[in-house]
Amino acid sequence: MFEPINALGGPLEPCSLDPLTGFYRDGSCQTGENNPGVHAVCIYATQEFLDYSKAVGNDLSTPIPQYNFAGVKAGQSWCLSGPRFVQAVRDGMAPGIFIHSTHQAMLQLVDLETLKEYALDL
């Protein structure tokens, strides 16, 4: 795993413990070499974003019981794949994010100013 540092250079804060999120299901958007999807950006899910995400092939809202996944609901926080966030930015559909809970690895995919533009916690 990479150092638990957020996009602003401080300690990586938890994203969500309910639902339990993160590639490692530890509540944080920690990432590492074995996380090729770079699930490193902590989003605030809205229904509009969940509908958009499903329409572009990333259904976050449908439960998958066999993986103990209840589905993300509007109003919840979730560690989203970095490339999916970049796609949503390009499409004008990016959700708000919690930058203190977004891993610095996102800076390899998008610039800090873009992350700040969507930050709900600045």
Image (cartoon, helix red, strand yellow):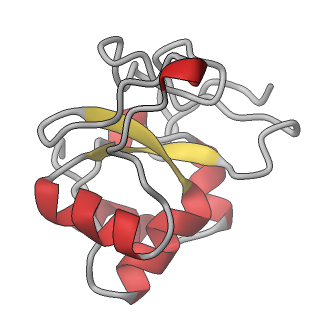
- Dividing the picture into quarters, in which one does residue 20 lie? top left
Q: Quadrant of residue 72?
A: top left
Question: In which quadrant is the N terminus drawn?
Answer: top right
Q: How many marks?
A: 0
Q: Is residue 87 left or right of residue 53?
A: right
Task: Examine the rendered structure and indicate whether residue 34 appears above or below residue 80.
Answer: above
In the picture provided, is 46 more to the left or to the right than 35?
Answer: left
Taking the image as drawn, is residue 27 in sight?
Answer: yes
Question: Residue 42: where, in percent of width, then height?
Answer: 39, 41
Q: Residue furthest bottom?
A: 91
Question: Which residue is at the far front?
Answer: 66
Which residue is pictured at 35% across the width and 34% down the height? 71
Q: Image point 37% across, 78% down: which residue?
A: 89
Residue drawn at x 22%, y 56% is 96
Q: Is residue 102 left or right of residue 1?
A: left
Q: Image point 39% across, 33% down: which residue? A: 63
Residue 111 in view of the camera: no
| 32 w.r.t. 80: above or below | above
Q: Quadrant of residue 44?
A: top left
Q: Position of residue 13 (x, y in %)?
A: 40, 21
Residue 94 vs residue 67, the one in the foreground: 67
Q: Position of residue 21 (x, y in %)?
A: 46, 24
Residue 29 percent coordinates (x, y): 53, 32
